[in-house]
Every structure is written in structure tokens, then in C-alpha cells.
Image (tube, rainbow, N blue to C red):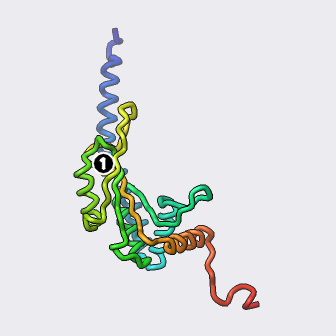
């Protein structure tokens, strides 16, 4: 029995939960506003990208998400896969800046068989603006009921792979652009031994 004038443990828990709820109702929007202000300020620092900056960012994006030649698997075609439509659109912009014309592009959806495959195919067609003939048959991943997946529901659209035909030279250029960007080196005319 609680002492006179003191709250019971249940009442303490109830008031604590209510206070916490009231606090977070006010604090969540304030925190999100601060986060958004930081994002907006950072975006303003970037501004419009130059052609050179698109090439650099695209090459780095490819080096992170694209298919690379390995000593045990020689391949020098350009293949890029991602599930984020913004990343896909940026990579398509990069390819355009690099001189790749739309007819050279092929697409393939990788998606779990338990998803709405037709809706995902329509989604990626709309995102890319590509002709349906450029899309190969979707590759379905076998559903494993023992795996708890977070990528489910209406927002799940699978991963889209972009293939560029006749792209060995483009692959070599991307390799060079990425190496230069990651090494921080710039080939300058008139520098080095010749200018000494």
C-alpha cells in the first residue's frame, strides 16, 4: 500500500509514459526540422553539377555498385545495379554525359518472387522512361520463408540492373576516371619531367 500523498508505482509509470509521449510529440518535429535544415544547407553547397563533376560522381558510383573485372572473372562490360530510383536516374544521367545513347541500354529487374512483379516492372519502366523492348525478363529470387525481410510492401520494387552494350571502352574509361578521382591525381599538361 503506498504511503499517503505518494503515487503508486502504476501511477508513476503512467505519468512517466504520458510525459515522455508529450515530450516526443514536440521534440520529433523540431529534430526533423533541424535535420532538414542541415540537408538543405548541404544541398545548397553543391548546386548544379558540371559535366566533369557528373563524370567523377558517376565513375565513383559505378565503382561502388557496378560490375568490375576480377583476375578470376574477366569482364569489361558496364553493368550497374541498384534499388534506389534516384541512384538509377543519376547513373542514367552519367551514361548520357559519357556519350551513351539510349538504344545501347538494357534493363533487368531482380526481385523476390513473393513481390508484385508486374507492378515493379511498371514502376521501373516509368522511372527510366525506357522502351519496354529494352527490358529483359525479370529474374525472380526464390522466397525463403525462414528469412525475415524488411524490403516488403508497396515500396519494394526490387533492384534494377542496367547493361550497356558494346561497352568495353566505356568500362576502361570508368576505370580510369574512378582511379583518378580516388587517387586525387590530376594529369596536368606541362607538368612533370618535361617541364623541368
Q: List x then y, in percent, for residue 8.
A: 33, 17
Residue at left offset 39%, top offset 59%:
161
Q: Is residue 54 above or below residue 123?
A: below
Residue at left offset 34%, top offset 29%:
16
Horizontal side, residue 177 vs residue 162: left or right: right
Q: Is residue 142 above or below residue 101?
A: above
Q: Residues within 10 Å of mark 1 (few under 14, many from 20)?
A: some
18, 191: nearer the viewer: 191
Q: Is residue 48 visible?
A: no
Q: Is residue 28 above or below residue 67?
A: above
Q: List x then y, in percent, for residue 17.
A: 32, 30
Horizontal side, residue 115 vs residue 165: left or right: left
Q: Is residue 194 above or below residue 19?
A: below
Instruction: Tell which residue pokes out farthest to the top in this image.
Output: 1
Q: List x then y, in percent, for residue 31.
A: 37, 50
Residue at left offset 50%, top offset 71%:
168
158, 186: nearer the viewer: 158
105, 86: nearer the viewer: 105
**Which residue position is annotated with label 1?**
156
Q: Is residue 63 visible?
A: yes
Horizontal side, residue 193 vs residue 108: left or right: right
10, 112: nearer the viewer: 112
Residue at left offset 23%, top offset 51%:
118
Where is the N terminus found, in terms of image quarters? top left
Amino acid at each position: 500500500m503506498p504511503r499517503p500523498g505518494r503515487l503508486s508505482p502504476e501511477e508513476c509509470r503512467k505519468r512517466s509514459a504520458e510525459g515522455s509521449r508529450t515530450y516526443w510529440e514536440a521534440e520529433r518535429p523540431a529534430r526533423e526540422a533541424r535535420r532538414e535544415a542541415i540537408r538543405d544547407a548541404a544541398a545548397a553547397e553543391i548546386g548544379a553539377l558540371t559535366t566533369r563533376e557528373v563524370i567523377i560522381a558517376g565513375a565513383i558510383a559505378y565503382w561502388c555498385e557496378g560490375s568490375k573485372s576480377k583476375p578470376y572473372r574477366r569482364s569489361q562490360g558496364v553493368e550497374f545495379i541498384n534499388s534506389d530510383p534516384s541512384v538509377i536516374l543519376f547513373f542514367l544521367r552519367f551514361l548520357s554525359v559519357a556519350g551513351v545513347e539510349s538504344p545501347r541500354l538494357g534493363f533487368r529487374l531482380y526481385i523476390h518472387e513473393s513481390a508484385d512483379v508486374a507492378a515493379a516492372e511498371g514502376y521501373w519502366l516509368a522511372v527510366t522512361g525506357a522502351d519496354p523492348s529494352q527490358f529483359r525478363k525479370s529474374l525472380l529470387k526464390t522466397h525463403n520463408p525462414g528469412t525475415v525481410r524488411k524490403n516488403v510492401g508497396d515500396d519494394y520494387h526490387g533492384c534494377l540492373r542496367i547493361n550497356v552494350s558494346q561497352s568495353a571502352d566505356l568500362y576502361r574509361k570508368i576505370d580510369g576516371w574512378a582511379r583518378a578521382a580516388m587517387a586525387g591525381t590530376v594529369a596536368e599538361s606541362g607538368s612533370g619531367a618535361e617541364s623541368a
